[in-house]
Image (cartoon, rainbow, N blue to C red):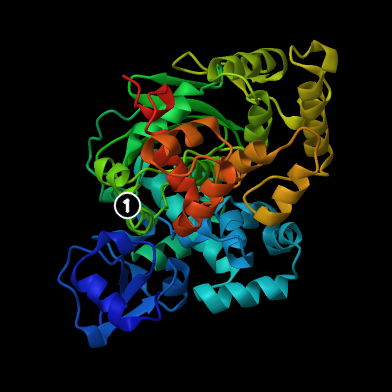
Amino acid sequence: MHTDTERCVRAVQSKDARFDGWFFTAVLTTRIYCRPSCPVVPPKPENMTFYPSAAACQQAGFRACKRCRPDTSPGSPEWNQRADLVARAMRLIGDGVVDREGVPGLATRLGYSTRQIERQLLAELGAGPLALARAQRAQTARLLIETTSLPMAEIAFAAGFSSIRTFNDTVREVFALSPSELRARLPKKRAGVTPGVLSLRLPFRAPLNPDNLFGHLAATAVPGVEEWRDGAYRRTLRLPYGHGIVALTPMSDHIACRLTLSDLRDLPVAISRCRRMLDLDADPVAVDDQLRTDPLLAPLIDKAPGRRVPRTVDEAEFAVRAVLGQQVSTAAARTHAARLVTAHGESVEDPEGGLTHLFPSAAALAALDPESLAMPRTRRTTFTTLVRQLADGALHLGVESDWAEARARLLALPGFGPWTVDVIAMRALGDPDAFLATDLGIRRAAQELGLPSTPAALTARAAAWRPWRAYAVQYLWATDSHPINFLPV
């Protein structure tokens, strides 16, 4: 979008928050870059230039605006609605792969050369993987400076910088303030700060309907791993350097996030995975406008716009839970999962109590005795085949997965039919166009609305909803009185 100057200027002049994260406005006279909704008086059009990423702005010598804080804007929805190389690379960079494995590690995961990845990222985003990862490190550093009382040296290494000097230079270059000056700008007394707990605000594009989003997560919560408490969804996180516990509370203009981490280096990864789970980088206006063109869906959207797709923080975990949920009730699936957690999950300490384990890893599940599984033999075969392939790497499910390839690999496994593959594609892989035409709840809703109720006919009708059929599933599910559709009291 950043190449459409006229459209960008209109968005800046109207302070349209919908475009935050889509592009960034760099002001040639002040050498500052902003989000489109920056509250200051817009600059003259001839003094504006537009970039597709904060990293590109920084590489061009612009510093972040202190008023609108463009580094905290929602991410571009492009990276979660596409499955091409650039989108998959951006999801991996957000997951911290460049910091942990370098650009060669990124290239290995994607199956391309480092040169090809550099070329495509530069062409579309104006910055290479190292610059994009550097921008993310700067944002992480700012979060730690503003939300903790940690010494600057600890913050530097937790944010992923290789030296304190690089940390100081980067913060000063990006924010036009030294780390100490950033902290000095904060109020002297910050109420409610709990030692060891990071309190953050996760932004999103309005509108956001939290009912089905948090309702689904709470209704399917696995005891010991997840819970709904005091208006917040809480769960344990398995992270690259350790583990964490997160509490997510829906607010009117943001999601309140409280994180407890065993290793602060996991902060950017934890934030990225929570944003992905809650689908916070979606563009709800674009989605709803497309679905509203169907006169039978329009009343559902007008009644409760802004539904998101509830996703996951761990793709392999969700695939296992999808198999446990085949042809059983939500309560039965939770019971099966809870037994596995108790027997094979890793214990963690929760300062608030309630959460006790990480969900078992694929390796731990592959080592269990199949006869100990209280499920039909055919589903037991499905389960053991899945976890064995996940454990030995024959099947990999992650943010970088090619959706078509992953679908084909899943369909080749015994016991994997269209419903299981599509629900994994929708909620684990993040395919916004996944569609559950065979789902009983979808067929029932279709019949009540006057839509075709047979899978083939409904799929044909749903072609007009593309590429947002996963969101149509949320609106159709919402016609039922199942607990997944309601924010817990």
Q: Quadrant of residue 319?
A: top right
| Residue 177 shows in the view | no
Q: What percent of the width, then of the height, locates residue 53?
A: 44, 68
Q: Residue at 25% of width from left, 88% of height from top?
A: 46
Q: Is residue 385 above or below residue 228?
A: below
Q: What percent of the width, then of the height, locates residue 418?
A: 67, 41
Q: Is residue 378 above or below residue 154?
A: above
Q: Quadrant of the N terminus?
A: bottom left
Q: Residue at 20% of width from left, 78% of height from top?
A: 43
Left or right: residue 302 compared with residue 322 = left
Q: What percent of the width, then of the height, locates residue 301?
A: 31, 46
Q: Residue at 42% of width from left, 52% of height from top?
A: 281
Q: Amino acid at mark 1?
A: Pro
Q: Residue furthest bottom?
A: 46
Foreground residue, 153 or 221? 221
- Residue position marked by numbered label 1 in the rendering: 295
Left or right: residue 100 compared with residue 151 = right
Foreground residue, 90 or 462? 462
